[in-house]
């Protein structure tokens, strides 16, 4: 089993956290100058201080960024998903002009070519179901059927491979012809497993997977170069090194769908619970593998289907939170720092998520449409918080309004540290002068907040 | 027994609600009493929603149960006279946005509340919306969107309705998670709602139904 350090199993969660934070802060990057290196180290220190609920040198400015840099540079969403030269130009310009304290999540700029090769059906993207200048969007549907819970619970990998993935990608439909890999265990049973690989549709599928692999590698290399440029020349660290999801959201976002899972809560609540419990170790392992490779402690976790209005407080406590908490604790045990992005309103959930079982100063809650003064009081007493500047304000407001909003927000919540200035949405649309006002206000009021 | 049906639906006891519906129909009850019991149940759930005791899953489940009941009742029901309808609502998610859940809940609840709902779907081209407003003369046009980029699409849709010369014949409401008063003003709509219950209340107010 892969380990972050040789003595990993002997380390406490606190020691593991320190080891991961040190690795992030001392990343082996060839910086353009000693000053840039210092800027990088200082910026990671801002994050370390904020996570530890201390007062950083200034409030870190860490907006969620989607297509905004593409538009700011005069390009479209389609350009961002297909043309890595334009993506690089846009990313360089955005970071040079605004110098935030974290790199925009390049991960959100997904490769259209890979999806075309695979005939990806689960999402629409520019030129494939949405207009040139919109972001990707999910095709809401029951990708997992209501009678498939037992298949998922009994063997998740087999379920993914033979039922879910063939629906997700047209090119991977032949996966359903293959046997489960768990059949492979003793010599007499081995050859039969390989027989389906002789079939032409399977061969074609494997060729498409290899083609998709080439396209994904091209994207990854572009992405590494783009992020590397911001780190090496501007000293801006990346925001996260891995991702995962809450078990309820895994089911509700892209498997049963929002509506399907809401109905399941009434019709088959025990199955929903059993499936979520089954997904906990998978969700932890997913983050852990990337975090170890990327040597970055922060785990990006966007959460959706537990927001205010999406379920009762009782359901949140009994259905959503227990397995999500298990994932968070599993990550923290490994020295990782969950960075949860609670999209929508989270006003009704604050007491629950301020759970005393989660060790203090070990994760980050970024909010969207949530009362930040209350969030600070309830959640901020235990964990770093952030976010909240509304996308609608940045898209439609005026710079003076943005300035006033940021000033008021920082006055309310940033005074004693433990706060990251961010946006409430992944930003696609903003007037450049408003985004400038956001950054400037963050610098002005965040220096002595 | 229609009281029992109202309770079964509003408590989201799906199997009970369907069984009671079958029993009522078998016993020769007036199908309109079943429809009335459902409307009453929806009012109960709508009130619970407004009071913070019911949430989106409860609205969706109630809609699901009522749709199943409606399927059972329809064959027994002579077509409903038009004057019983509160009005016509044309509804869609605007061009460039494919989010359907909020719009679907609004459509379902408006239908149960007694409106004729014409749901144009998602990512609906502006000329299609204009054409449907001209053709159907709805009292209300509902535009939904979840993305911030939908604001400009809503604005363009409202402008196109105005350009077609039918803006004064239809009230336009907008909705979707990021929609607020500022968005409503920005796009030039007549009103907005923060959720499906608010949308039904607004629609009722506009047609003088409440």
Image (tube, rainbow, N blue to C red):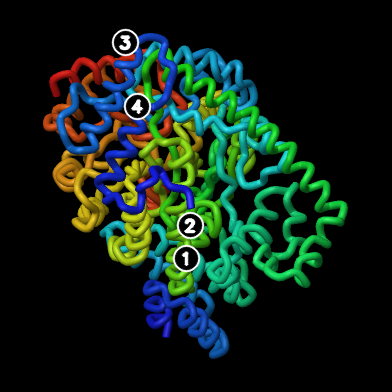
Between marks 1 and 4 in the image, the one whose residue lies nearer the viewer: 4
Mark 3–mark 2 Cα distance, whole angstroms, equals: 41 Å
**Image x and y of residue B188, in percent:** 42, 28
**Image x and y of residue B51, in percent:** 26, 59
| Chain under numbered label 2 | A
How many residues crowd around disc 3 within 10 Å: few (fewer than 14), some, or many (20 or more)? few
Mark 1–mark 2 Cα distance, whole angstroms, equals: 8 Å
Q: Earlier in the sequence, mark 1 or mark 4?
A: 4
Q: Are marks 1 and 4 on the same chain?
A: yes
| Chain under numbered label 1 | A
Q: Are marks 4 and 3 on the same chain?
A: yes
How many residues crowd around disc 4 within 10 Å: few (fewer than 14), some, or many (20 or more)? few
**Residue A278's disc number:** 1
Mark 4–mark 3 Cα distance, whole angstroms, equals: 14 Å
Can residue A163 be seen? yes
How many residues crowd around disc 2 within 10 Å: few (fewer than 14), some, or many (20 or more)? some
Callout 1 touching callout 2 (CB < 8 Å)? yes
Would you name the residue on which mark 3 appears?
A35
**Residue A234's disc number:** none
Between marks 3 and 2 in the image, the one whose residue lies nearer the viewer: 3
Residue B9 higher or lower than A59, as above or below: below
Q: Residue furthest front?
A: A6
Q: Are marks 1 and 3 on the same chain?
A: yes
Q: Earlier in the sequence, mark 4 or mark 2?
A: 4
**Callout 1: SS:** helix
**Residue A26's disc number:** 4
Residue A162 higher or lower than A2, as above or below: below
């Amino acid at each position: 089993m892969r380990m972050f350090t040789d003595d990993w199993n002997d380390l406490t969660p606190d020691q593991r956290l320190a080891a991961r934070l040190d690795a992030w802060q001392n990343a082996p990057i060839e910086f353009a100058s000693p000053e840039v290196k210092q800027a990088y180290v200082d910026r990671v220190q801002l994050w370390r201080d904020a996570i530890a609920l201390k007062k950083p040198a200034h409030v870190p400015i860490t907006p969620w960024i989607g297509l905004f840099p593409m538009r700011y540079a005069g390009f479209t969403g389609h350009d961002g998903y297909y043309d890595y030269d334009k993506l690089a130009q846009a990313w360089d310009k955005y970071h040079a002009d605004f110098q935030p304290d974290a790199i925009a999540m390049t991960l959100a700029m997904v490769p259209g070519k890979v999806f075309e090769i695979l005939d990806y059906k689960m999402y629409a993207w520019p030129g494939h179901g949405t207009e040139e200048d919109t972001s990707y969007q999910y095709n809401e549907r029951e990708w997992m059927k209501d009678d498939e819970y037992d298949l998922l619970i009994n063997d998740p990998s087999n379920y993914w491979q033979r039922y879910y993935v063939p629906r997700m990608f047209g090119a991977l439909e032949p996966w359903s012809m293959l046997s489960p890999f768990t059949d492979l265990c003793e010599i007499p049973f081995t050859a039969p497993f390989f027989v389906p690989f002789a079939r032409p549709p399977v061969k074609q599928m494997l060729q498409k997977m290899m083609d998709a692999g080439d396209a994904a590698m091209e994207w990854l290399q572009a992405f590494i170069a783009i992020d590397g440029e911001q780190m090496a020349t501007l000293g801006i660290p990346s925001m996260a090194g891995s991702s995962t999801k809450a078990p309820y959201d895994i089911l509700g976002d892209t498997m049963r769908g929002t509506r399907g899972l809401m109905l399941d809560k009434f019709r088959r609540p025990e199955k929903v619970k059993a499936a979520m419990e089954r997904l906990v170790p998978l969700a932890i392992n997913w983050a852990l593998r990337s975090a170890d490779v990327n040597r970055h402690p922060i785990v990006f976790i966007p959460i959706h289907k537990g927001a205010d209005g999406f379920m009762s407080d009782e359901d949140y406590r009994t259905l959503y939170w227990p397995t999500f908490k298990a994932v968070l604790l599993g990550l923290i045990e490994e020295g990782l720092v969950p960075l949860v992005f609670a999209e929508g309103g989270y006003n009704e959930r604050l007491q629950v998520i301020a759970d005393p079982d989660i060790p203090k100063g070990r994760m980050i809650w970024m909010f969207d449409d949530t009362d930040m003064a209350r969030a600070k009081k309830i959640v901020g007493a235990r964990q770093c918080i952030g976010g909240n500047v509304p996308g609608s304000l940045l898209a439609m407001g005026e710079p003076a309004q943005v300035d006033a909003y940021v000033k008021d927000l920082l006055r309310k919540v940033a005074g004693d540290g433990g706060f990251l200035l961010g946006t409430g949405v992944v930003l696609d649309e903003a007037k450049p002068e408003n985004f400038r006002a956001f950054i400037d206000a963050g610098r002005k009021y965040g220096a002595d907040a | 027994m229609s009281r029992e049906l109202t309770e079964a639906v509003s408590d989201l006891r799906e199997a009970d609600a369907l069984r009671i519906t079958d029993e009522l129909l078998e016993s020769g009850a007036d199908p309109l009493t079943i429809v009335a019991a459902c409307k009453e149940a929806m009012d109960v759930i709508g009130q619970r929603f407004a009071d913070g005791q019911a949430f989106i899953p409860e609205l969706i489940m109630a809609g699901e149960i009522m749709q199943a009941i409606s399927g059972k009742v329809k064959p027994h029901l002579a077509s409903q006279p038009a004057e019983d309808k509160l009005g016509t609502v044309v509804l869609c998610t605007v061009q460039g946005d494919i989010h359907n859940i909020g719009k679907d809940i609004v459509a379902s609840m408006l239908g149960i509340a007694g409106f004729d709902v014409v749901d144009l779907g998602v990512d609906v081209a502006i000329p299609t919306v204009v054409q449907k407003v001209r053709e159907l003369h709805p009292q209300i046009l509902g535009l939904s969107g979840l993305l911030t980029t939908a604001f400009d699409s809503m604005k363009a849709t409202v402008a196109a309705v105005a350009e077609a010369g039918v803006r004064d014949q239809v009230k336009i409401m907008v909705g979707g998670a990021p929609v607020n008063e500022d968005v409503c003003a920005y796009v030039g709509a007549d009103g907005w709602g923060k959720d499906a219950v608010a949308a039904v209340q607004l629609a009722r107010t506009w047609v003088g139904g409440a």
